[in-house]
Image (spheres, rainbow, N blue to C red):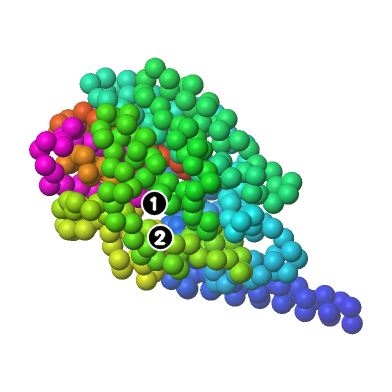
Amino acid sequence: MKQRADQLLVGGFVLTLFLMLLTFLLLPKEHFSELENRVLQSAPHLTWDNLLSKKYAEDAESFVTDQFPFRSKWLAVKSSVEQLRLQQENNGIYKGHSGYLFEKFVEPDYSKIQQYAESIKQFAISHPEANTTFMLAPTSVGIYADRLPWLAPNYSQSKVNQYIADYVRGSVSFMDGFEFLSPYASEPIYYRTDHHWTTNGAYLAYVAYAEKMGWHPLSKKEFHIQTVSNSFLGSYHTRSQFNGVTPDSIEVYKPIQPISTEMYIADTGEALTNMYDASFLEKKDQYSYFLSGVHALMKLTSKLDPHVIKQEKLLVIKDSYAHSVIPFLTLHVPEIHVIDMRYYNGSISDYMSENGIKDVLLLFNTATFIDNSALLKLDTKKR
C-alpha cells in the first residue's frame, strides 16, 4: 500500500512538472509586467560568447523566472501570505513609517561601481571640449533611513555617492543629491509608493543645476502647481502589493508665462506638442505622464525669448529620474537632447559632434547607477 502511495505521489509530481512545462511553452511571453512596472527578460540568445561568459545561463534563469506561468498571481499570493505573518518586507520592499515604502539597499559591489564610474570618467576625458556635469540623487531610503522598520538593514547611499564623487573628481563636475535634498527632507520630495522623487524633489534638482550653470531659476511663485492625480500607486507598491497603502499625488509645475515645447521621440518617430501625456494617468505607470515614458532618444525644442537663452543646447544622459526634471530645463535651453543608455546603442560622440553639443548633464539615482551595466557604453575605449 505504501509503495502504491509513493508511486502515485511521484507520478503526480512528474505530471505537475510536465503540465507546468507545457503551460510555460504554450502561454504567450509577456514583454512588460504591469504589476512590477518593468520590462521582463526575453528569450536568451545562444552564442559562444554568451555561453563562455555564463551570460546565457544567467539570462535563461531570468527568462524562466520572469515568464513563469501566472507569475503575477503568485506574487500577489506571496504578498498576502507575508502580510498575514505580519512581515514588514516583501519582494525587497519594506513597509516603513509615515506611509512610506522603501526598497532594500544592501552593500553594493564596489568593483562594478568602479567600472561604471570609470566609464563616466573616460566619457568626460574623451570630450574635453564639453562642459560635463554628473548629478547623482539618492532614493528615498537614502534620505529617510530613520523611517525604515526597526532593525531593517540598510547600507549608506551617502557613502556610495561619496565613493563615486571621489573617483570622478577632476574629470566631471559632480553634484551630490544629498546636498540639495537633505535641507528639504521635511517636505514631500519622494513619492511614498514609488522609487522616483516627486515634482517638488525634481524642482529642487532643477534649482541646484540652474544655479550651478549661472541661470536664474524660476521660483515656485512663477508656476501654476496643479495636482493631476490622487491615485498613484507606484513601483514599490506594485512589487510589494502591501494592503492599506495610501496612494500618492502627482503634481505638475507649469510656468505662469507659458512656453511652447515640441518633443520628438526618435524611437517611434512621433512628434508631440506636449511634454505631459495624460493618458498614462489612467494606467498603472502614472509616472510616465512625464515625457511619455522611457525612450532611447528624444529631442525637445522650446520657443524661448532670445534674451533669456544662456545655453543653446544640452544633452541629458539619464535614467527616469530626469523625466520630471527636464520640463524645468526647457525654460532655459531651447534644444535638449535626451539619451537613455539602457536602450540607445549609437555612438554618443558622433551624436554630439553631429548636433554641435557642448554641454552634458548625466543624471541618475544611486540605486539605478550601481546596477546599470549600460553605463559601460559611455567608455569609448570599450565600444
Where 201 falls versus 212 (above or below)?
below
Coordinates of residue 80 in the picture (x, y in percent): 66, 70
| Residue farthest to the right, as pictured | 1
Q: Is residue 66 visible?
A: no
Where is residue 348, by image quadrant? top left
Q: Quadrant of the N terminus?
A: bottom right
Residues in magenta? 298-326
Whether residue 253 sits left or right of residue 79 in the image: it is: left
What type is the residue that disc 2 sits on? Ile
Is 306 magenta? The answer is: yes
Pick the front one: 286 or 70 = 286
Please give left or right for residue 302 compared with residue 16 in the image: left
Find the distance from the CA under tag 2 to the CA under tag 1.
Answer: 7 Å
Give the residue pinned by disc 1. Answer: 199
Element on which disc 2 rests: strand
Near-viewer residue (158 or 84): 158
* Residue 339 drawn above or below residue 8: above
Residue 184's x, y, as percent? 49, 42
